[in-house]
Every structure is written in structure tokens, then in C-alpha cells.
Amino acid sequence: MKFMTEVTKFTDVSQVTEAPAFGDGAYIYGLTMEGARWDVKAGVVKSSNPKELRCAMPVTKIVPVNADKYDNKGYYMCPVYANMQRANVYSAQVSTFSLKLHNDDSNNPDRWTLASVALLLQDELAV
């Protein structure tokens, strides 16, 4: 059993009207992305906008898949940390989420690894 993530176009949790069907995953909300941004319209990872260190992620669906059907080609395996102190022992990596890449980047997910792109469960700079 493995997990894939599907980032929705819902930018606010109030837009989710019903839970996924049983066995079809779960929605999560409240993550922030550091080092890049999520393009809601295109549904892919993009470079950050100028002067934007972090961006809020849309509602994300975590979907279980059988290991034999798991295919991460065209995805960036993005680390998920507890908070922005990710170099600190107090912020361990808690998971890895598969984020869809633009066709131009699908053969080079290392670009985002080199940019230190990560998802954060807690953003200390959030209000």
C-alpha cells in the first residue's frame, strides 16, 4: 500500500461539500509550500512569485493505491515537515507527498529537490 496526493482546485475548506467515498482517500487542508508555489489553475508545481517565500496549498486529497499500481513518474516526491525549522531536530520529516509536475519538468523532478521545495504542516509566519 502506498499513497498518492491529488491537489484539488478548492482554495478554501468551505468549498468541499462532501467527504470522499469510503476507501477513496481523505481531504486535508492547511499546508504551506516553501521554495515554490502551487499553480491552482494548471494544477502543477511552479516557481515562486517574486517576494513570496511561502504559499498556502489548496485542499489536498490523500489517496491509497496498491503498490503494483503506484507510479510516481511526472511527480515531485515532496517532503512534508512539521514546521519551517526543517534543519532542526525538532522538525522531522513526517511524510512525502507526490505533487504533479508540468510537462516541462516531468523528466527533471530534481529541479525542485535542488530548490529545497517542501510542504510544511505549520507555518510560524501565518497569522
Image (cartoon, rainbow, N blue to C red):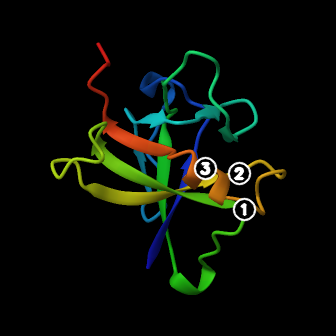
Residue at image coords 15%, 48%: 90
Of the two numbered discs 2 and 3 in the rendering, the one whose residue sits closer to the viewer: 3
- Give the quadrant of the N terminus: bottom left
Q: Residue at x 48, y 56 (%)?
A: 97
The residue carrying mark 2 is 101
Badge 1: residue crowd in 10 Å (few <14, some 14–19, many ≥20): some
Q: Are marks 1 and 2 in contact (CB under 8 Å)?
A: yes
Label 3 amino acid? Trp
Name the residue: 46% across, 45% down: 118
Quarter holding residue 43: top right
Task: Read off the residue under disc 1.
Answer: 74
Coordinates of residue 16 in the picture (x, y in percent): 48, 32
Residue nearest the observer in this picture, 88 or 80: 88
Instruction: Give the class, few, some or many, for how many residues have Cα within 10 Å of label 2's Cα (few <14, many ≥20).
Output: many
> In this view of the protein, which residue sits in the foreground, 78 or 61?
78
Q: Check disc 1 and report its element: helix, strand or loop.
A: loop
Report the Cα–Cα distance between label 1 and label 2. Answer: 6 Å
Which residue type carries mark 1? Gly
Disc with the residue nearer the chain's start (1 vs 2)? 1
Q: Which mark is residue 112?
A: 3
* Nearer-N-terminus badge (3/1): 1
State how far apart marks 2 and 3 are (Cα): 10 Å
SS at mark 3? helix
Q: Residue type at mark 2?
A: Leu
Circles 2, 3 touching at the beta carbon (< 8 Å)? yes
Q: Residue at x 78, y 63 (%)?
A: 107
- Mark nearer the N terminus (2 vs 3): 2
Q: Nearer the viewer, mark 3 or mark 1?
A: 3
